[in-house]
Amino acid sequence: MQEAVLYTQEQGTTVQCHVCAHRCIIRNNHRGLCGVRENRNGTLVSLVYGRSVAEHVDPVEKKPLFHYLPGSQAFSIGSVGCNLACKHCQNAEISQFPQTHGGAIIGHRRTPQQIVDMALQTGCRSIAYTYNEPTVFMEFAYDTARLAASHGLGNIFVSNGAMTREAAAYIAPVLDAINIDIKGFSESFYTSLCRGRLYPVLETVRTMYDLGVWVEVTTLVIPGLNDSEETLGQIAEFIVSVDPGMPWHVTRFHPAWQLQDTPPTSVATLTKARDIGRAKGLAYVYEGNVPGQGDADTRCPVCGAVCVERYGLTLVANRIFQDRCPQCKTRLHGVFV
């Protein structure tokens, strides 16, 4: 347990949390919507500081990040809890654990030094704060990231983007890359499917980009919910408005949590999404969760040469030299060394 950052004292012992976009007003002995930030007599505390429920060595491409140190490994950690409640959540067993287990908090007890040591011992080049929403364990992520940076490790957030500007500004100085979900492109989608709002997510994409963090965007394409040409086109147009060189991952949905009866996304739908993104002006669009079928290669946006060849999440060949296309020498968008 650790005192939280970014909260204010309100009337009496009530506090307001300013880490995520809900900005929960929390009465004494109550928690925010995330289920892991609790008011203890007017002090907001994180119940998941140093509580790691998942630890794995993953290819950085799994985040997915295709333009940040391709082919490298990321030591990936997460806690329980989330500030959203997406009906299609692929990790609901941990993200919704406090809500489905009477407020229980679980996880291995870890210090930032232990996480950094494990990352170094396993040959990873970065630490990824992922599996659940890292915003809800912001304090532990920040302390670990700051220490990791001093040891030459990169730091990655895999985020739903529903954080405040204050939170983005707080974590950005120790963050190297972030993948942000844009799950749909209407407030009604976010309200009905995710218990959230669209606007803060779009704001986080812009804010992180403006603060110099490498940003990639993911959309899990769900049949009948966000797979229309209009929705996909709107998402692509927004990304282009920030930077046409920002990668967009359109990934396959598999039945999960409260959407068990929704069928998996067809490869044809992902190809349609890819084509829409390219037609709108995006330089890099990737089809995900369809190894061997979708387009996962990084191509030069000028000459079309394959600069990074992949099979699903596996790097086959990295032909980039000094951030440039090996054929026409165009500088590519990303962090490659």
Image (tube, grey):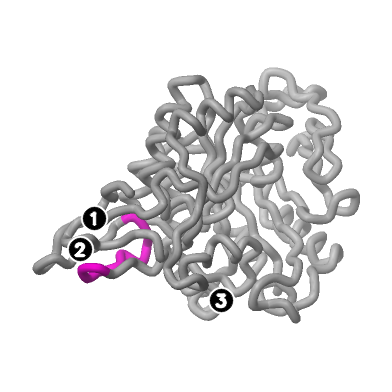
Identify the residue under disc 2. 15
Label 3, residues with CA under 10 Å away: few <14, some 14-19, many ≥20:
many
Disc sitting over residue 193 in the figure: 3
Q: Residue furthest left?
A: 12
Q: Is residue 260 visible?
A: yes
The picture quadrant where one finds residue 328 is top right
Q: Residue at x 65, y 65 (%)?
A: 233
Q: Earlier in the sequence, mark 2 or mark 1?
A: 1
**What's the residue type where badge 3 is placed?**
Leu
Q: Please, is residue 322 above or below residue 147 in the view? A: above
Residues drawn in magenta: 19-29
Main secondary-structure element of the magenta-colored stretch: loop
- Three-letter amino acid code at disc 2? Val
- Can you tell which mark lies on residue 290? none
Q: Position of residue 93 (x, y in %)?
A: 60, 64
Q: Are marks 2 and 1 in contact (CB under 8 Å)?
A: yes
Q: Which mark is residue 7?
A: 1
Distance from disc 2 to disc 1, alpha carbons, whole Å, reads: 7 Å
Mark 1: amino acid: Tyr
115 vs 250, left or right, is: left
Task: Tell me: 200 left or right of 26.
Answer: right
> Which element carries disc 1, helix, strand or loop?
strand
The crowd level at tag 2 (other Cα within 10 Å; few <14, some 14-19, many 20+) is many
Query: Does the rendering let one see residue 242?
Result: no
Residue 316 position, x and y percent, is 85, 32
- The stretch drawn in magenta includes residue 253: no
Q: Which tag, 1 or 3, sits closer to the chain's start?
A: 1
- 235 vs 210: above or below: below
- In percent of the image, x 66 and y 51: which residue is there? 248
Nearer to us of marks 2 and 3 is: 2
